[in-house]
């Protein structure tokens, strides 16, 4: 018994087409979009926050602060990250200016903590 490949392909295509018609009749082709897109200003603000996280050192800093039970002294971060102190200070300033970390000055040393609400708000736009 010889199977004609072209007939078989046409049969498979027809079955798939008929199956899709049935699915579309039951569920509709596409779900309507019901949510409004972000405003231009909100999108710019959120994109700026995500650009901050494009640097691996900043992501590592945030992970260290997230794992810490409380505030972390800036003096402990260079050794933990394996980078020099000016690099740590620069990245912490960027994160602080963006509102992702809090800073408290205690005498000579600064102590940093993750602002979980700000980070959650940034990530929350993805899972609405």
Image: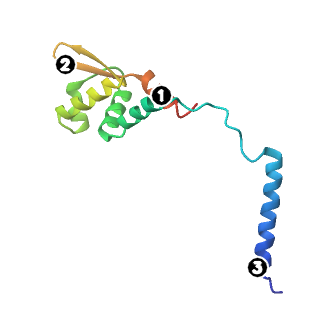
Checking the image for residue 98, the label placed there is: none
User: Circle 2 sits on which residue?
Assistant: 109
Residue positioned 81% across, 55% down in the render: 21
SS class, disc 1: helix
Query: Residue 121: percent from the left, percent from the top?
Result: 48, 25
Checking the image for residue 6, the label placed there is: 3
Q: Residues within 10 Å of mark 1 (few under 14, many from 20)?
A: few
The scheme the figure's colours follow is rainbow
Query: Residue 10: percent from the left, percent from the top?
Result: 78, 73
How far separated are the C-alphas under marks 3 and 2?
Answer: 77 Å
Residue placed furthest toward the top: 107
* Residue situated in front as seen by the camera: 112 or 100: 100
User: Circle 1 sits on which residue?
Assistant: 42
Marks counted in the figure total: 3
* Residue situated in front as seen by the camera: 60 or 46: 46
Query: Residue 23: percent from the left, percent from the top?
Result: 80, 51
The quarter of the picture where the C terminus appears is top right
SS class, disc 3: helix
SS class, disc 2: strand
Query: Residue 113: percent from the left, percent from the top?
Result: 33, 22
In terms of image quadrants, where is residue 98?
Answer: top left
Residue placed furthest toward the bottom: 1
* Residue situated in front as seen by the camera: 117 or 51: 51
Going from N to C along the chain, the mark reached first, 2 or 1, is: 1
How far separated are the C-alphas under marks 2 and 1?
Answer: 35 Å
The quarter of the picture where the N terminus appears is bottom right
How far separated are the C-alphas under marks 1 and 3?
Answer: 54 Å
Front tag of 1 and 3:
1
């Amino acid at each position: 018994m010889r199977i004609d490949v072209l007939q078989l392909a046409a049969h498979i295509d027809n079955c798939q087409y008929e199956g899709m018609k049935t699915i579309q009749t039951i569920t509709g082709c596409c779900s309507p979009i019901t949510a409004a897109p972000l405003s231009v200003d909100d999108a710019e603000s959120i994109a700026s926050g995500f650009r901050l996280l494009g640097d691996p050192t900043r992501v590592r800093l945030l992970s260290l602060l997230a794992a810490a039970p409380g505030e972390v002294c800036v003096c402990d971060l260079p050794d933990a990250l394996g980078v020099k102190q000016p690099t740590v200070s620069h990245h912490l300033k960027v994160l602080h200016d963006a509102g992702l970390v809090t800073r408290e000055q205690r005498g000579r040393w600064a102590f940093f903590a993750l602002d979980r609400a700000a980070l959650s708000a940034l990530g929350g736009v993805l899972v609405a």
